[in-house]
Image (cartoon, rainbow, N blue to C red):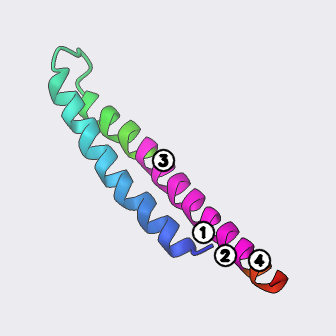
Amino acid sequence: MNMRSVLFCGLITCILGSVLGLALAEINRGDRNPNSHLHYAIVGAAIGLFIGSAQEGIRQKAREVLDEEETLTSYKH
């Protein structure tokens, strides 16, 4: 598994998640917490990092399994 690719995808979705969190904080301006923008951004970034890294890890693992299956079928013929 290419950890650089997993880390890169995680960081990109982390940035997107923090932007989405800031957008949600702007929509929810009625929140009485003065640090709500920071809280929404941190939660969005954490969720984005987790989802992006997990998605890329699953994608790479699926590719490895498919490559192994192709290798096994080519040896059978």
- Span highlighted in magenta in the image: 47-70
The residue beneath circle 4 is 73
For the N terminus, the image quarter is bottom right
Determine crowd level at label 3: few under 14, some 14-19, many 20+ residues with C-alpha closer than 10 A: some
Of 37 and 75, nearer the camera is: 75
Of 37 and 6, nearer the camera is: 6
12 drawn magenta = no
Residue 28, x across and y down, in percent: 20, 20
Q: Is residue 28 above or below residue 55?
A: above
The residue at the point 48 percent across, 71 percent down is 5
Residue 67, x across and y down, in percent: 66, 75
Question: Residue 47 sits in which quadrant?
Answer: top left
Q: Secondary structure at mark 4?
A: helix
Q: CA distance from mark 2 to mark 4?
A: 10 Å
Kindly identify the amino acid type of the residue bearing the numbered disc 1: Arg
Q: CA distance from mark 4 to mark 1?
A: 15 Å
The residue beneath circle 2 is 67
Kindly identify the amino acid type of the residue bearing the numbered disc 4: Thr
The residue beneath circle 1 is 63
Mark 2 or 4: in front is 4
Determine crowd level at label 2: few under 14, some 14-19, many 20+ residues with C-alpha closer than 10 A: few
If you read the primary sequence from the N terminus, does the residue marked by circle 2 or circle 4 appear first?
2
Q: CA distance from mark 1 to mark 3?
A: 18 Å
If you read the primary sequence from the N terminus, does the residue marked by circle 1 or circle 3 appear first?
3
The residue beneath circle 3 is 51
